[in-house]
Image (cartoon, rainbow, N blue to C red):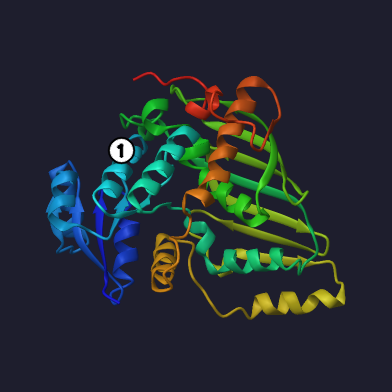
Amino acid sequence: MPKLRIALVGTGAVAENHAEAVRAEPDRADLVAVCDIRAETLDAFCAQWDVTATKYTDVVVMLDAEAPDLVIIATPPWTHLDLCIQCMEAGANVLCEKPLVGSLAALDVLENVQQRTGKQVSSIFHWRYGSGGQHMKALIDSNALGSPLVAVCQTVWFRDANYYAVPWRGKWHTEMGGVTVSLGIHAIDFLIWLMGGWEEVTALTASLDRDIEVETVSMAAARFRNGAMGTFVTSALSPRQTTSVRLDFQQATAELEFLYHYTNQDWRFSLIGNAPYQPELDRWLTFKASKRAHQVAQLAALLDAREKNAPQPVGLDEVRPTMAFVSALYKSARTGQTIRRGEIVPGDNYYDHMHGVPPRA
């Protein structure tokens, strides 16, 4: 099978993760083009990563000249929808950074373009692809530790005023949301994926201690489709930064604590001492695979799917539960109501705009 010809659009900080991901697959992928409207940023990125791919400052020119198989989009959130459409219409599949788009309506626009062009678009939700997360998903799906009962998910990070001084941050129409989508969405997606979906959510949000439009704190209580209950806390105001996920089962507790990219060593298991479950703990402790939860792992999964002629992982159908949850979280916080899965449909303000109000340009 020929190598996948990849173009990277956007060369800000997150692009480094994608450069590392492509570099990790020398036998299966080639970075053939890099594009950024800022020539100086583009040049600096290519120099830092010793990138020899052709450089472009116009995505249309790049698509026409290179005809890439896959475009990785690592630009600010407000640009994602138009870029995804441009790339699919030019004949390329897309792998886009989070948040993929800013509403369920925009997600449906992408679905229509996907059907019309025959191309695929996926979202970066790479925490699903760490070997520890894959192992945890298998344990849950096999009921190996008993039924999941309680989940606690925290993304408590720190972002100062300088962070929000970047012109597109802190605004609904450019960042597409506050900490829920800019910081917490990876952990939110990870837990929803582990649990097999959500059923209802009740939430609060607030913009505390930063002079911005969007929230700096969100808190939510949720019921999952498997009957378990959980909480989500996301903050940009927490000096001791950490990401943590705790899962309590009938026979065990699984805990994960890290910051941005977890490894197997970041997981901890505690059992209640019931002998039949000891092999599960032993199996974890002797677990051989060790993939970081990183863009490297998700690109590898995409390349594996390509070799099997299977759909790209984390396609629109897999993104929708997380996008619907975030929309429901915002609706619950604004209305004071508990929002159920499937409640936000065309005609609902929260279908058209994540927080229910058209953002100011």
- Coordinates of residue 63 in the picture (x, y in percent): 18, 51
* Quarter of the C terminus within the rendering: top left
Residue lying at 44% horizontally and 62% vertically, measured from the top left:
298
- The reply to whether residue 207 is visible in this rendering is no
Q: Nearer the viewer, residue 250 or 226?
A: 226
Residue 308 figure quarter: bottom left
Task: Give the secondary structure at mark 1.
Answer: helix
Q: Nearer the viewer, residue 321 or 192?
A: 321
**Farthest-out residue, front:** 116
When the figure is inspected, residue 62 is found, relative to residue 251, above or below; the finding is: above
- Coordinates of residue 346 in the picture (x, y in percent): 53, 28
Q: Which amino acid type is marked by label 1?
A: Asp
Provide the residue designation for mark 1.
Answer: 82
Q: Report crowding for label 1: few under 14, some 14 to 19, many 20 or more residues within 10 A (C-alpha).
A: few
- Relative placement, left or right, of 296 versus 156 is left
Residue lying at 49% horizontally and 19% vertically, measured from the top left:
357
Q: Nearer the viewer, residue 242 or 128?
A: 128
- The reply to whether residue 51 is visible in this rendering is yes
